[in-house]
């Protein structure tokens, strides 16, 4: 792909994510000890003029570059590129991200996704064997390295063991077989619940996915079945769910001391592992119905397929099936997809990083376990973009599928809040630049129960601790620039539903 293919976006395209906001809408911008109330720019504001004006307002050096802002920074909100400022809704408090050195083409963000080199990857990689089975000193070193990677780059790699790789490999094969079924067959594998929750199959635009979350005994899980009433798909995905659930909870528990969090309190925020089931039959055998019988789990495993036909242009960031967003939960553990595509914004907001394509640099390295216990030079990103071979016909070339030896780990908004911004949820999207071949990804989202409590929200009407549901509704869904404003509520419909 050429550089032009990877920059399908002009300034006005990304700014059009928001509407043409009135200058009467204002946000509070902060840098150092300076606080400025600033009008939300319209989507036709020149980005260079905006940058120059902000530099004057905050008395910044001429060499300084404002690369982004942290939305809702006191509550652990994510870092955003400066171009998203026009999509703010008004009323947010944002801390500017200011670099003290010039970066080429910075105001033309997003630049093409950059690949990390081998040493940079190894600085972000830890071994599951060392995390789980190492000596006390090795485990401490590995978790400190993991925490530093999440803080410094927004994500980390885990080099997994052979048994874990086999679980992922089986799940990918099962997912490919399932998604190859006719649409009329797949849509039957879905059960919906109140508040727009569901399990099973869904198709949204150019992507389709199968959602897995535990359900109470009153429900059955809608696994597809063959003529014999069995399902290899169900068997493979249940094993994957349990593996990723245990992995995520183990990582969370051991990260707590490094984030100055109480592991017991975090544990109490999660669903009990005994709650719910993933069976194809209802488990309730009595006439007595308890609230737990209608349980729908908070943790979610999603099996995604991205598959664009040959001849279709790569959608880039503007038309991505999974666009820019940050995850809402505590921790995301995502086995590396079979083809690259996951792209994340660096914490300094000056680079998009091609997280999965970078792994080609170490994919065939048979010494990863020992190398993850070493320190490696911390170098600046050197490659301008991912140079993946695609034939002129639009058909994918001889691009190898990524081996299932790695998990990618990153935080969600809830953990960003709880850690007071020590680690933040990174912005990311899926760059679908491999056309004509299915990409299977399987992220696992560990989430707090909606009724669990988090600390009070700064600069809001909430004076005391609030529920996770309130944090999502009153803060995340109302202040994040990539989330479209919801339409006004229909009070008549809401009243009828409550009745």
Image (cartoon, helix red, strand yellow):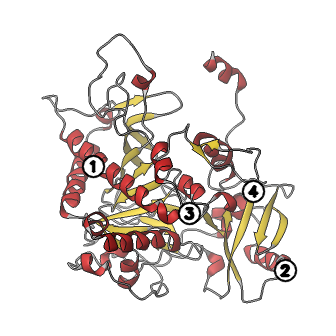
Q: Is residue 465 left or right of residue 201?
A: right
Q: Label 4 vs label 1: CA separation?
A: 39 Å
Closer to viewer: mark 2 or mark 3: 3
Q: Residue at x 67, y 62 (%)?
A: 73
Q: Find the distance from the CA under tag 3 to the CA under tag 4.
A: 17 Å
In this view, the residue farthest toward the left is: 228
Q: Position of residue 395 (x, y in %)?
A: 31, 66
According to the picture, the residue beneath numbered tag 2 turns out to be 56
Residue in front for this viewpoint, 494 or 182: 494
Q: Which residue is tagged 3?
A: 424
Residue 302, above or below 286: below
For label 2, the SS is helix
Instruction: Kindly identify which numbered label has been placed on residue 92.
Output: 4
Q: Residues within 10 Å of mark 2 (few under 14, many from 20)?
A: few
Crowding at label 3, few (<14), some or many (≥20) Cα neighbours within 10 Å?
A: many
For the residues bearing labels 2 and 3, Cβ distance under 8 angstroms:
no
Nearer the viewer's eye, disc 1 or disc 2? 1
Q: Earlier in the sequence, mark 3 or mark 4?
A: 4
In which quarter of the view is residue 374 placed? bottom left
Q: Which of pointers 4 and 1 lies earlier in the amino acid sequence? A: 4
């Amino acid at each position: 792909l050429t550089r032009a293919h990877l920059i399908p976006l002009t300034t006005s395209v990304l700014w059009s994510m928001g509407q043409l906001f009135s200058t009467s809408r204002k946000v509070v911008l902060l840098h150092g000890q300076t606080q400025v109330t600033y009008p939300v720019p319209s989507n036709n504001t020149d980005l260079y003029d905006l940058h120059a004006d902000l530099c004057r307002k905050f008395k910044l050096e001429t060499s300084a570059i404002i690369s982004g802002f942290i939305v809702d920074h006191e509550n652990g909100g994510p870092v955003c590129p400066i171009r998203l400022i026009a999509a703010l809704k008004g009323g947010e408090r944002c801390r500017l991200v200011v670099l003290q050195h010039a970066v080429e083409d910075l105001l033309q963000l997003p630049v093409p996704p950059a690949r990390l080199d081998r040493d940079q990857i190894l600085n972000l990689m830890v071994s599951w064997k060392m995390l789980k089975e190492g000596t006390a000193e090795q485990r401490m070193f590995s978790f400190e390295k993991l925490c530093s990677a999440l803080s410094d780059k927004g994500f980390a790699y885990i080099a997994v063991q052979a048994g874990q790789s086999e679980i992922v490999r089986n799940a990918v094969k099962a997912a490919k077989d399932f998604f190859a079924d006719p649409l009329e067959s797949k849509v039957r594998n879905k059960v919906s619940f109140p508040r727009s929750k569901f399990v099973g199959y869904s198709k949204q635009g150019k992507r389709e996915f199968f959602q897995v979350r535990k359900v109470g005994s009153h429900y059955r899980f809608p696994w597809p079945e063959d003529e014999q009433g069995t399902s290899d798909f169900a068997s493979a995905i249940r094993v994957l769910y349990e593996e990723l659930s245990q992995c995520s909870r183990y990582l969370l528990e051991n990260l707590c001391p490094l984030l100055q969090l109480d592991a017991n309190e975090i544990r109490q925020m999660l669903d009990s592992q005994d709650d719910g089931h993933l069976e194809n039959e209802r488990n309730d055998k009595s006439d007595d119905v308890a609230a737990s019988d209608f349980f729908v789990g908070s943790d979610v495993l999603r099996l995604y397929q991205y598959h664009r036909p040959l001849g279709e242009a790569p959608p880039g960031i503007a038309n991505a099936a999974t666009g820019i967003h940050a995850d809402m939960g505590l921790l995301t553990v995502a086995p590396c997809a079979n083809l690259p595509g996951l792209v994340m914004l660096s914490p300094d907001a000056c680079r998009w990083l091609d997280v999965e394509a970078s792994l080609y640099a170490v994919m065939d390295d048979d010494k990863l376990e020992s190398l993850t216990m070493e320190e490696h030079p911390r170098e600046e990103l050197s490659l301008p973009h991912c140079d993946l071979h695609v034939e002129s016909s639009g058909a994918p070339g001889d691009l190898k599928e990524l081996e299932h030896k790695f998990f990618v780990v990153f935080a969600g908004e809830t953990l960003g809040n709880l850690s007071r911004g020590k680690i933040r949820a990174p912005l990311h999207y899926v760059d679908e630049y491999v056309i004509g071949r299915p990409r299977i990804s399987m992220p696992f989202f560990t989430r707090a129960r909606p009724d669990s409590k988090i600390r009070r929200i700064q600069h809001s009407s909430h004076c005391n601790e609030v529920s996770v549901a309130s944090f999502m509704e009153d803060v995340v869904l109302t202040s994040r620039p990539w989330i479209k404003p919801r339409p006004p509520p229909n009070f008549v419909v809401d009243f009828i539903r409550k009745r």
